[in-house]
Amino acid sequence: MEHFLEFGFVCIENCFDTSPGSVAHRWVEESWARNGLDPDDPSSWPADKIHMPNSESALVSEMSPKALAAMGELCGGQERIQEGMRWSNGFIANYGWGRDEEWKSPSVESPGWHVDGDSFVHFLDSPELALLVVVIFSEIRPRGGGTLIACDSPGIVARCLAEHPEGLEPGGQIPVKELVSQCRDFRELTGKPGDVVLLHPFIIHASSYNHLPVARFMINPPPRLKEPMRFERNDGSAYSVVERSILNALGKKSYDFRIATPRRKVVPARIARQQALLEQEKARLGAG
Ligand SMILES: O=C(O)CCC(=O)C(=O)O
Ligand SMILES: [Fe+2]
């Protein structure tokens, strides 16, 4: 977990079964027909990514106790994470997004930097996103569409949120462009099917161009905390690794943080988009 504190992420290998006959393997196989694509003809794939809707899911406690245990280690114990977490076949499938653009190493200029959590107003202690999780279903090699991350962003975002106890709305109010311009350590996530990458909930990240004829399948299912994070624990309970990383970024041993407006949800445009895709899938499979 030292790696997580230093770089904002840790890769846990071989977290779930992806061999033929497994649920994960079947979800990937089925995704081709769901999207109306031929797995054997990369030239026919869209130069794009598709955020697929969910049509099937499984309990993480059954699919990957190993990943769940690792999430618990970072969040101060599995008992602090909301139960019943599920993983699904709602892949973010990158078939070749940016295939026709020039490849550039990840940098401040890379397009699409953001923090996750488009459905709630963000506070330093928000419980809605305990970690950013990247569950990998296909081999991801360099330049193969692996998520870009700014490893030094969590502390920068933490200091920004500490200055805004009134909360910041996703999209508009979080000054991602300005924050990412302070970052220096940009990387591309690579991995193998069955790997799970656990990242800091504040990490600034982006999709990357896929210049390989290999489709990239992953999901980003958000674990949720039962209670907001705490930066003053006077009752003898332990700070989680994530809480400690935030305190480190603020240069504090403890921090009296209080939200200044009530927590609230926002409705993301993504929901309507995915509903439309689900209708299209149904029509396509019904017709086939
Ligand atoms: O496509 C990726 O690698 C990242 C996608 C992502 O960050 C998102 O959908 O929020
Ligand atoms: Fe994201």
Image (cartoon, grey):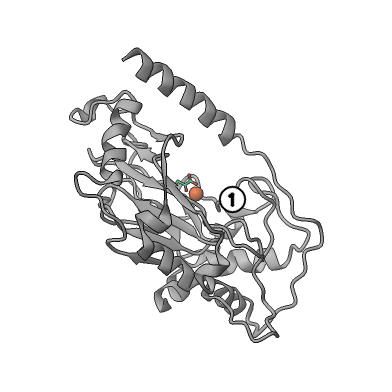
Q: With respect to residue 53, does 255 lie above or below?
A: below
Image point (59%, 67%), residue name: 156
Q: Does residue 249 appear anywhere in the picture? A: yes
In the depicted view, which residue is nearer to us: 266 or 287? 287
Question: What secondary structure is found at the residue carrying circle 1?
Answer: loop
Image point (46%, 73%), residue name: 73
Left or right relative to 193: residue 35: right
Left or right relative to 281: residue 39: left
Return the residue at label 1.
117
Q: Position of residue 148 (x, y in %)?
A: 41, 54
Q: With respect to residue 4, does 196 lie above or below?
A: above
Quadrant of the image containing the N terminus: bottom left
Q: What is the quadrant of residue 281 in the picture? A: top left
Q: What is the quadrant of residue 249 in the picture? A: bottom right
Q: Position of residue 215 (x, y in %)?
A: 28, 39
Quadrant of the image containing the C terminus: top left
